[in-house]
Image (tube, helix red, strand yellow):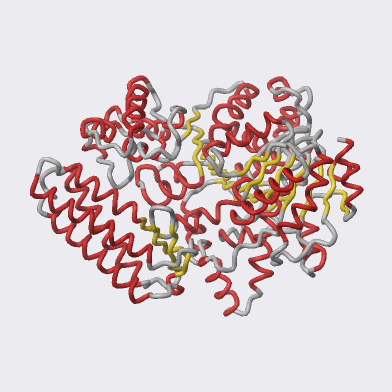
């Protein structure tokens, strides 16, 4: 960056600069200015930059300033739809105001976020509802659709996110008719995509980036080669999302949706409907039989771990045979119209994918199953995405920015860059400006049993009780598994009842995540118990949260099929899988959980890690060094006194 550019960046972020005029309680942070300059250089030189910006650096404004000013056409990918909205409705308008520039900004979400007028009308005409609420919900959706410019389902707050009506009024890539649809000219998704193509700044999320941009939609893939700057915020999630979408997956729900769409399409053909109804019943039974052959305790399972693989294989082949029959039926109508052709193409594609999954002919993929309440998903996940991602990155003559508060392990970025093949990327570490040593304790309790001990959760709750009392509630308990979360929640409620403690206890699963957070903030003295989804993306500032308790070091379950296969491969190559993969990934997750406590300059509190391995094991020091500079103690009385004074 030349001196003039440095000067303008310093001026923009100075206490007397334009950003200060647009933000309340703005504070100059040298780390933020440094990051803005680094991003500006990366944009100018079209290089790849991996930058960890600790909590409080202000990374969003640090990358928005140079990208809006000099980034040309910019694609920003975030971890969640909530972060997309935060950028679009809050952060970018403030930067635009400060810069006094007009930049065309658009937000694009996955197709399931937009009403499909054709499917809505078909559902309305056929009246095929799962329960009495569906008709009422459909009326609300239709009224919204008639008056909406965006057609975004998130704007209809009166309908639950998990309602069965949503798949009936939104499209998938498979059932969308595209230009053959009668509503194409007024399609909400088409409108959103056209606006995306015209954007100077486009905001997407990681799932959409990889699902649509990289692989699926040729129309959308045109955006990336034209982008001058690609920014991944919350980039620590990119390797996991990339590995999922750069692989293949087939869900039993795709099969059921296909047969239901066939029934809907051929409703005027009684003979065909009779066959389709029988076939639908057979397919449902096949899927049920497959689920029954998978151990009920196995949610994620390597295909090689099936107890009765032969029986599974035969049932799976029967499923394919039924799809072959469906394909034959549809082939007779494929030339009737565009919809029939698409149904035939969907059946063909599903049959090919299911056959490929059973053959397991790609040595670079891990073949595994994931079982949900109603569906089974058949996955083929690449062992590594580094080569694929690196090739894709080279196709676009762009600057690439990867940023998060959790990318490094004790100052090293080797783990993250190796996962994505970013060997030539420049890396930078910017420490949090917060005064952790003055404002917070990191406490590891004494006399805590081994995490595998059956009494571990009971002891944890008893150790937590005096801390929760001292903090007057105002606590998060973050568990590493749903099972632990539920057990800790039940034990805590029992202890509260025995000891006549009346702080509200809120447990993940009792409602939507945002509703639970709002309840927590509203009470002001609550204890919220959550699993891994509460370890990141949660921002509770001020005295409402003064205590965060983590049950165990968040090592990935060794039984996870993808993780297990990667460990096996590394071990066969003579690499220490624990030090090269298991420990680094646990540290990244732990840093996310630890980051929930201190969210601004004025926050104070205690971080508790109830896992003695951080003290006793040789690798514990590597974990210590990767965490913020808390005041560290094993004295219960010290942290109780600190909490009581808050």
Q: Nearer the viewer, residue 84 or 309?
A: 309
Please indicate whether residue 637 sits to the left or right of residue 377 in the image: right
Q: Position of residue 445 (x, y in %)?
A: 83, 56
Q: Position of residue 633 (x, y in %)?
A: 88, 53
What residue appears at the point 74 percent right and 29 percent down from the top-left corner? 13
Quadrant in the picture for the N terminus: top right
Q: Nearer the viewer, residue 529 or 43?
A: 529
Please indicate whether residue 332 sits to the left or right of residue 129 in the image: left
Please indicate whether residue 435 sits to the left or right of residue 611 in the image: right
What residue appears at the point 49 percent right and 32 percent down from the top-left corner? 200
Q: Position of residue 515 (x, y in %)?
A: 58, 34
Can residue 184 be seen in the rendering of this structure?
no
Question: Above or below — where is 23 with respect to 371?
Answer: above
Q: Nearer the viewer, residue 345 or 136?
A: 136
Q: Position of residue 500 (x, y in %)?
A: 76, 40
What residue appears at the point 78 percent right and 39 percent down from the top-left corner? 546
What residue appears at the point 13 percent right and 48 percent down from the top-left corner? 273
Question: Which quarter of the picture shows residue 487?
Answer: bottom right
Quadrant in the picture for the C terminus: top right
């Amino acid at each position: 960056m030349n001196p003039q550019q440095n000067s303008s960046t310093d001026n923009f972020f100075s206490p007397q600069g334009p950003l200060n005029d647009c933000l309340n309680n703005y504070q100059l942070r040298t780390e933020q200015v440094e990051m803005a300059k680094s991003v500006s250089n990366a944009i100018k030189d079209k290089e790849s930059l991996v930058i960890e910006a600790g909590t409080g650096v202000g990374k969003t404004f640090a990358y928005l300033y140079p990208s809006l000013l000099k980034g040309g056409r910019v694609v920003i990918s975030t971890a969640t739809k909530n972060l997309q909205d935060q950028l679009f409705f809050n952060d970018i308008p403030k930067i635009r105001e400060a810069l006094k520039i007009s930049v065309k900004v658009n937000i694009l979400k996955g197709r399931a976020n937009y009403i499909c007028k054709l499917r809505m009308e078909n559902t309305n005409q056929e009246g095929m509802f799962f329960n009495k609420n569906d008709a009422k919900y459909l009326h609300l959706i239709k009224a919204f659709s008639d008056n909406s410019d965006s057609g975004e389902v998130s704007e209809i707050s009166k309908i639950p996110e998990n309602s069965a009506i949503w798949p009936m009024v939104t499209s998938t890539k498979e059932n969308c008719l595209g230009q053959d649809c009668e509503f194409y000219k007024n399609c909400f998704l088409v409108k959103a995509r056209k606006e995306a193509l015209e954007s100077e700044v486009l905001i997407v999320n990681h799932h959409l980036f990889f699902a649509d941009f990289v692989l699926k939609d040729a129309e959308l893939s045109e955006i990336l080669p034209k982008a001058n700057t690609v920014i991944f915020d919350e980039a620590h999630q990119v390797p996991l999302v990339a590995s999922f979408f750069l692989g293949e997956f087939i869900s039993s729900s795709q099969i059921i949706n296909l047969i239901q769409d066939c029934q809907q399409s051929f409703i005027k053909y009684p003979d065909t409907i009779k066959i389709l109804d029988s076939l639908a019943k057979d397919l449902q039974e096949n899927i049920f039989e497959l689920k029954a052959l998978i151990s009920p305790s196995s949610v994620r399972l390597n295909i090689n771990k099936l107890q009765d693989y032969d029986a599974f294989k035969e049932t799976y082949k029967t499923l394919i045979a039924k799809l072959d029959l469906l394909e034959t039926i549809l082939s007779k109508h494929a030339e009737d119209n565009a919809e029939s052709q698409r149904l035939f193409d969907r059946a063909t594609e599903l049959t090919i994918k299911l056959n490929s999954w059973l053959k397991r002919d790609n040595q670079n993929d891990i073949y595994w199953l994931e079982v949900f309440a109603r569906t089974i998903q058949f996955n083929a996940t690449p062992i590594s995405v580094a080569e694929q991602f690196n090739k894709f990155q080279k196709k676009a003559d762009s600057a690439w920015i990867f940023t998060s508060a959790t990318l490094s392990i004790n100052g090293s970025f080797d783990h993250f860059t190796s996962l994505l093949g970013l060997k030539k990327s420049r890396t930078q570490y910017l420490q949090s400006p917060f005064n952790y040593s003055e404002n917070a304790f990191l406490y590891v309790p004494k006399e805590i049993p081994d995490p595998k001990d059956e009494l571990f959760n009971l002891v944890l709750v008893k150790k937590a009780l005096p801390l929760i009392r001292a903090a007057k509630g105002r606590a998060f308990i973050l568990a590493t598994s749903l099972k632990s979360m539920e057990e800790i929640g039940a034990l805590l409620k029992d202890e509260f009842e025995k000891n006549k403690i009346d702080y509200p206890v809120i447990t993940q699963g009792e409602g939507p995540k945002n509703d639970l957070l709002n309840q927590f903030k509203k009470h002001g003295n609550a204890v919220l118990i959550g699993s891994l989804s509460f370890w990141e993306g949660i921002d509770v500032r001020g005295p409402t949260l003064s205590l965060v308790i983590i049950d165990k070091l968040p090592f990935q379950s060794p039984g996870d099929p993808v993780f297990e296969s990667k460990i096996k491969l590394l071990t066969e190559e003579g690499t220490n899988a624990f030090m090269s993969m298991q420990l680094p990934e646990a540290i990244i997750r732990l840093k996310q959980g630890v980051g929930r406590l201190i969210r601004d300059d004025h926050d104070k509190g205690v971080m508790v890690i109830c896992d003695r391995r951080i003290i006793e094991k040789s690798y514990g020091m590597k974990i210590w060094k990767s965490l913020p500079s808390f005041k560290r103690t094993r004295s219960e009385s010290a942290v109780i006194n600190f909490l009581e004074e808050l």
